[in-house]
Every structure is written in structure tokens, then in C-alpha cells.
Image: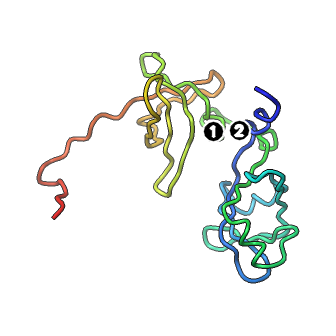
Amino acid sequence: MDSTEKKFKNRVLMGQIGAAHGIQGQVRIKSHTDDPLALKKYSPFSTNRPGLEITINKARLNKTVIVASISGVADRTTAETLNGVKLYVNRDQLPETTNEDEFYQADLIGLEVKLENGDKYGTVTAIQNHGAGDVLEIRPILGPSELYMFTKRIIPEINVAEGFVTFIPPTEIEVDEEEAFEAE
């Protein structure tokens, strides 16, 4: 692994810039921190755009997002160019977790996925959330990636120190014919 790969592997996604807000260059940011306003204390951020670094000057909470003023952005047109920019910090900038049930999602990427009997099933490749909860992406030893709800029933054990998660594949859901949806 070269130094560039190491640099990016150690990055943690902290938020993502959305639409411009107003005419003075403010942007909406979806924060991935427990306290959305805590995002500001990790500034400046590296981004998914080469050479672009983002510094948050001011931030306030607005419903589920923060509205922020960004250094060097003074008008709506410039703010609109930042839509979709992802904000990252190095993993070592984050506080250590205090108990074994706490972890950063980024710490799970690359962990081995084992079945209950200890057999290797695959590798964790991503954690996604499209609004209905976290989804774990697993790349099995053979075949394409698979997506599973990230629940204790499906992933009952997470052992970051030893580099694995335990996986219980969900069984097929039986559908009662009276409850099934029918397209008309």
C-alpha cells in the first residue's frame, strides 16, 4: 500500500455538503456526528475533490442539517459548486472509543466476516445509509457484493481488535398469501 492509499484509508467521512443556503455563500451540510454542530471542531476537512480543503467558519443547526459559512465562499454561485463534496478527517483526529460496544463505522471496513461456526464468509466493504437505517455491504469469498441490514440479529458480534464480525445470514421470510401485495 503506497502513502496515498494509506492517507485515504485512514480518512473518516464526517459530513457531506448539500445545497446552497441563501445568497451569501452558506451551504447545508449533513453531519455524520452525534452532535451535528460538533462537526465544526474538526475543521479543516480534506474532501473527495483533489486539492480542495474546506474550513467551516460559522455553523448553526437548521432542523436536521447544519447551515455553514465556508472560508473563501462568499456567494451563492460558489456555494452551489460545493454540492456533493464529502468532508473527511484523519482517523487519528477522532477520540478513541471507550467501550467494546462502541466503534466508528470506518473501523469496520475491511474486517473479515465470519459465520457463527468460524468459517470465513467474506469481507465488510462498506456501510451505507439511505435513510432507513444502516446497511452493511459484504463481499463474499465468491460472488458479487451483498447488502444486509446492520442489526444485532444479523451481526451479533463485532471484534475490531481481532479484525472480524460474526454474521448470521437472514433466513428467507415466509409470506402468508393473504398478506402478500398483488399488483393490479
Which residue ends up furthest to the bottom in the rendered image?
A: 23
Nearest the viewer among 103 and 132 is 132
Q: Where residue 40 appears, x then y in whole percent?
A: 80, 60
Q: Where residue 14 appears, x then y in whole percent?
A: 70, 52
In the figure, 179 relative to 144: above or below? below
Residue type highlighted by circle 1: Glu
Marks 2 and 1, how far apart in space?
Answer: 6 Å
Q: Which residue is drawn at 44% across and 40% down?
A: 147
Relative horizontal placement of residue 179, taking residue 71 as reference (left or right): left
Instruction: Tell me the tag on residue 102.
Output: 1
SS of the residue under disc 1: loop
Which residue ends up furthest to the left in the rendered image?
A: 178
Q: Where residue 63 appears, x then y in whole percent?
A: 61, 72
Q: Which residue is drawn at 50% across and 58% down?
A: 131
**Which comes before the other along the chain, label 2 or label 1?**
2
Q: Residues within 10 Å of mark 2 (few under 14, many from 20)?
A: few
Residue type highlighted by circle 2: Thr
Quadrant containing the C terminus is bottom left
Relative horizontal placement of residue 72, taking residue 170 as reference (left or right): right
Nearest the viewer among 21 and 35 is 21
Q: Where residue 119 appears, x then y in whole percent?
A: 45, 16
Q: Residue at x 46, y 41 (%)?
A: 151
Residue 101 image-quadrant placement? top right
Quadrant containing the N terminus is top right
Q: How crowded is mark 1: few (under 14 residues within 10 Å), some or many (20 or more)?
A: few
SS of the residue under disc 2: loop
Find disc 2 in the rendering and name its residue.
97
Residue 20 image-quadrant placement? bottom right
How many circles with numbers are drawn on the protein?
2
In the figure, 32 relative to 172: above or below? below
Mark 2 vs 1: CB contact within 8 A: yes
Q: Residue at x 85, y 55 (%)?
A: 44
